[in-house]
Amino acid sequence: MANLTLVQAINLALVQEMERDDRIILLGEDVGLNGGVFRVTEGLHKRFGGHRVVDSPLAESGIIGTAIGLAMAGLRPIPEIQFEGFLGPAYDQLCSHAARMRTRTRGAFTVPMTVRVPVGGGIHAPELHSDSPEAIYAHQPGMKVVMPASPYDAKGLLLSAIRDPDPVIFFEPKRIYRAFREEVPEDEYTIPIGKARVVCEGDELTMISWGASVIQCMQAIEKSGRSVELIDLRTIYPFDMEAVAASVSKTGRAVVVHEAPRTCGFGAEIATRIMEECFLSLEAPVQRVTGFDTIMPYYKLELEYLPETERIGLAVEETLAY
Amino acid sequence: MTKTIPTISSTSIRSHGGARASRSLPAGVPPDTIVKWFRDMLLIREFEVRTMQAYQEKKIGGFCHVYIGQEAVAVGCTAAIRPDDPMITAYRDHGHALARGMSSRHCMAEMFGKIGGCAKGKGGSMHMFDRANNLFGGHGIVGAQTAVGTGLAFATKYEDEVINGGRSDRVTLCFLGDGALNQGVLHEAMNLAGLFDLPVIFVVENNGYSMGTAIERGTTMAHDLSVKAAAYGFDAIEVDGMDLIAVYEDMKAFCDSCRAASRPGFVDMKTYRYKGHSMSDPRKYRTREEEEHFESGDPIGKLRDVLLSAGVLDEAAVAAMQKEVRAEVKDALQWSEESPAPGIDELYHDVYVERWGPYTGTSLPEMLREEKR
């Protein structure tokens, strides 16, 4: 057991999985010699060689398209896209090919590919380097979307993603890449895709979040002094509605917190599902604490945009007082 | 000083077709094999004619792009590679599927949207996939398949170097239309292929038009596409795609050299589609004279003449073969007609892996909701 950051936990998962399975190939811009833009793949090029840890040209569509071909031919590619904003050029390959191949071929061809992508704000970067596009990819049937909020979960979820026979976008929240450490077992363990985590139990209100915002939620809950149940979704799609419904049926109140813009953010889906499945348990309207319906601002306004503890705390108060 | 842009007349670009003497039979190929190629071309032609009829009778939904005129390309290229070599193409894909060995029943039923289709009627005309015959689709977004083709070749190289210890030597044939020359992803794919020494051949089925836009109206250097490959450091050849023997001989030599060197290649495959881009194309962008010029040099007629004059087939044998493919396609149509349509429960299958039972999603149709209750 070692005390690891999120970056180190992902690195460990990659090393162990590459040792186990020689079908795994990493490719992306600067993932090799330079260890990746956030140094997540540090040391892997030296350890596994340039055939397995491939520095690709700067060409996102080409990287993802090539990875799809690798996967259809039976390998387990793990492409890295440097920032979530750079998924744009690869959108066609992800949504026109990867997500649809199983349905289109009636299961004859699948795309077991894990796309690793740093995501979200909080590191003083501009737009396209601070966005949260998880709802866009969750909206694509056939795609799985995962976002860990802790080093322990990152390792377990990444192993599940790599072994999953469907394409997975594995979003890594940059803000917590090195923000804290956690005990991460050396031994192999997996965390199933589609299962949420109850971070802390409570009976007055359910808070649902994912990614780096989970930390802000924990702080807000502590500050509020109320009995709030915090659910870290971990998988955005297919998401664990069972866990959400069980908690909201118990508490009768819900607040959803995410970084992405409010309109059509994944919180909208969760709020609707709560309304559909827990209507008779609800004591208050479901609140959302989110980014705004604007382009992600540059760093001076960054903390205004992201759901901070104060805004989350206000939503908790309002929902409880309703 | 004003730069002078050379003008190229459309006739000079499309000078390949028309009635011309064909080559003699390729050396070292058993006559039976060539007869099989001839039959494959006949089958594709008959299949596509009946496909058009079925479309007009509204038995085929969506959009439909037929391969009539280009038969020598799919058949000749398939003949030039090994069965384990991956092949991938765009949406004008019925010819590739049949040439690669998909049964005409499964191919036709797929277009009918019936359960008997190669993907149980889930993919349709543009998405022919055949795992057993290493056909990796059938893709609807112009040019997008080229990066996937590069990946298929990358897998061969990876297996060769990392897993199999130098025993994988497949060549991937990645087909694209001339319209795809102007898609950005092709250039990413070609750069990757050149950079990593990937055994993939980009075969441009250059039929002269991307939908209604003549190649010289949409593509730079249309008179010499080899420069596109030169930019990425690999060899290019030009092939008369209206002559099956030329396609076979030129592609065989090129595939063999790309295989031996583990290098990419580029082919300007000059061909012509007799019909419109899709079934609803009035073909206002070209003349009937041009169409007749190409039809006069039909690849099927050309090979028939060669086989007749070489004494491999006689008129009676050709007539018998024509009768045979007509019967085969008739059977495919009937089989597709009788094949059941997919039930609503098919909708939720194969969206995701069904390790834990069928995927239920979040938006079950009413019928399934009833069943679930």
Image (cartoon, coloured by chain):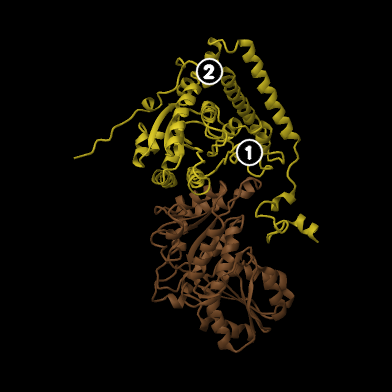
Chain colours: A brown, B yellow
Q: Amino acid at mark 2?
A: Leu
- Residue farthest to the bottom, as pictured: A225
| Front-most of residues B291 and A79 | A79
Chain identity of mark 2? B
Q: Dividing the picture into quarters, in which one does residue A252 lie?
A: bottom right
Report the disc number at residue B132. 1
Q: Tell me: B140 left or right of A282.
A: left
Residue B186, image x and y in percent? Answer: 43, 44
Q: Earlier in the sequence, mark 1 or mark 2?
A: 1
Residue A60, image x and y in percent? Answer: 44, 54
Residue ID for mark 2: B303
Label 1: element kind: loop
Residue B369, image x and y in percent? Answer: 76, 59
Residue B28, image x and y in percent? Answer: 51, 20
Q: Quadrant of the C terminus of chain A?
A: bottom right
> Is B5 placed above or below A107 here?
above
Q: Amino acid at mark 1?
A: Ala
